[in-house]
């Protein structure tokens, strides 16, 4: 007689309490990450405005790097949660092992780009020599040592998928705090320790060290505190029935981030086309992403928790818990994004003042924060809907939504608005794109509800 395995809390705990229990540690850890992002740029802004712009131009590379890692993690998360809901623990172990195998393959590709592709990437852009050199130093280091971020994200997803989000809060917090502490050490140097001032390259070194520390701690937590998943060489053996569902959900997620990189790169080219204020506008665009992370990263933390809960309860055939999860998650997301809109509308000067801005930077930045932030409440709906697509194995819907909001709508709108010759009008493109994506999300959710959720109610 086989040993009876107790029901995971994701199938029995009251949904509101469960979502709070799982999301709160993720939200806190995401806020720490957002704090790191802002502090990192505050330090770099003390070096020069060129360094700020360099990090803005580095964002598409970092986005692809992190996007690939998150894509694998999301795919593993969905398969692992579904397998645990079905009590298929063997498949859960192979999901973890094959996810690690895929992470190593992606790491090798990004390292090669870090060695050979970073210089051409920066030289092809219309920037000063100082901006290009700072960017090449920063991106090269982050790409060559990219394995740390892949391991960190994958091991944290294993903890999230099994409901151990408190541990991920610790790992992400340790990595971010280490990064914040080490930033001034490597950016400005410490004479008594013989550490020279390295500017943007120093920021990259601090980032890499923080990622590796978080990865090591996440691995220890999985080995010591996560009995639902076993890590072993035998689970690294490639299995089509594990790799296929991981890629089915993960590739669309990675593509979404890749689309974000294309969007960011193209937006920078549009902004750099304004001859008098191009580099300043590009720097503002980068700072906007840092500031909006205080609201979007906690939202993504809630999104990650919702994915695990919805996927588990889909595997366990509990549709009422799926709907309840989405309703509560959306209510919390909407509240958060309304707070973000109010902050950007009322105190943009205070937020931008953290980055040692010039008068031109402050003028363009205030208009950017106010114009863009009107789309935040609409984004809450789209992001929560995307979590349901990913959790239910319809990652392609997420890809289509991202295409609508970042390529089909955002870039054409930004380009057309740029023809006015007024840089501040470009920011309204975000509102146009979010309205389109919300409409597409609603249509897709109605379809997935009829095909996957409604039949579960019929089984009752």
Image: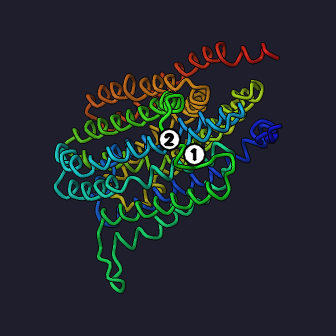
**Horizontal and vertical percent position of residue 170:** 61, 60
Q: Does 246 sit left or right of 123 as displayed?
A: right
For the question of whether residue 364 can be seen, the reply is no
Question: Residue sitting at 50 percent across and 41 percent down?
Answer: 99
Q: Are marks 1 and 2 in contact (CB under 8 Å)?
A: yes
Give the label on residue 413, or none.
none
Q: Residue at x 72, y 30 (%)?
A: 313
State which tag comes first along the sequence, 1 or 2: 2
Work out whether residue 191 or residue 1 is closer to the camera in this orientation and state it. Answer: 1
Reading the image, the residue beneath label 2 is 99
157 horizontally vs 350: left or right: right
**With respect to residue 259, does 159 lie above or below?**
below
Does residue 141 appear left or right of residue 160 in this picture? left
Image quadrant assignment for residue 1: top right
Residue 450 position within the rendered picture, expressed as x and y whole percent measured from the top left: 66, 13
Instruction: Please give the label number shown on residue 157.
Output: 1
Mark 2 surroundings within 10 Å by alpha-carbon count, few (fewer than 14), some (14 through 19), many (20 or more) = many
Q: How many marks?
A: 2
Of tags 1 and 2, the one toward the viewer is 2
Secondary structure of residue under mark 1: helix
Q: Residues within 10 Å of mark 1 (few under 14, many from 20)?
A: many
């Amino acid at each position: 007689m086989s040993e009876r395995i107790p029901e995971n809390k994701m199938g029995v705990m009251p949904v509101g309490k469960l979502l709070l229990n799982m999301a709160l540690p993720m939200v806190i850890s995401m806020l720490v990450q957002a704090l790191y992002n802002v502090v990192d740029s505050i330090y770099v802004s003390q070096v020069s405005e060129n360094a700020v712009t360099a990090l803005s131009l580095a964002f598409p590379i970092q986005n692809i790097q992190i996007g690939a890692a998150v894509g694998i993690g999301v795919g593993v998360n969905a398969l692992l949660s579904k397998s645990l809901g079905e009590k298929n623990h063997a498949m859960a172990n192979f999901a973890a092992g094959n996810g690690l195998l895929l992470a190593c393959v992606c790491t090798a590709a990004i390292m090669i780009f870090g060695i050979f592709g970073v210089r051409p990437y920066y030289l092809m852009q219309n920037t000063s020599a100082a901006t290009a050199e700072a960017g090449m130093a920063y991106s090269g280091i982050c790409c060559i040592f990219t394995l740390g971020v892949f391991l960190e994200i994958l091991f944290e997803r294993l903890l999230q998928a099994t409901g151990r989000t408190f541990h991920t809060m610790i790992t992400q917090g340790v990595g971010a705090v280490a990064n914040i502490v080490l930033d001034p050490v490597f950016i400005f140097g410490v004479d008594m320790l013989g550490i020279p001032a390295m500017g943007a390259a120093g920021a990259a070194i601090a980032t890499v060290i923080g990622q590796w520390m978080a990865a090591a701690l996440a691995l220890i937590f999985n080995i010591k505190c996560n009995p639902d998943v076993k890590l072993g060489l035998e689970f690294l053996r490639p299995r089509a029935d594990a790799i296929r569902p991981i890629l089915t959900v993960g590739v669309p997620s990675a593509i979404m981030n890749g689309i974000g990189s294309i969007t960011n790169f193209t937006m920078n080219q549009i902004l750099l086309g304004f001859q008098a204020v191009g580099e300043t506008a590009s720097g503002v665009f980068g700072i906007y992403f840092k500031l909006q992370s205080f609201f979007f990263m906690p939202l993504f933390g809630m999104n990650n928790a919702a994915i695990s809960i919805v996927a588990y309860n889909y595997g366990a055939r509990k549709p009422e818990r799926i709907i309840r999860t989405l309703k509560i998650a959306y209510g919390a997301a909407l509240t958060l994004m309304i707070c973000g809109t109010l902050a950007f509308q009322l105190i943009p000067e205070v937020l931008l003042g953290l980055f040692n801005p010039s008068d031109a930077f402050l003028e363009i930045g205030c208009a950017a924060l106010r114009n863009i932030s009107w789309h935040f409440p609409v984004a809450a709906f789209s992001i929560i809907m995307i979590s349901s697509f990913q959790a239910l194995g319809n990652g392609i819907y997420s890809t289509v939504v991202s295409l609508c909001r970042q390529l089909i709508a955002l870039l054409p709108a930004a380009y057309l608005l740029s023809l006015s010759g007024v840089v501040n009008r470009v920011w309204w493109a975000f509102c146009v794109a979010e309205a389109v994506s919300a409409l597409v999300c609603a249509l897709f959710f109605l379809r997935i509800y009829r095909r996957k959720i409604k039949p579960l109610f019929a089984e009752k």
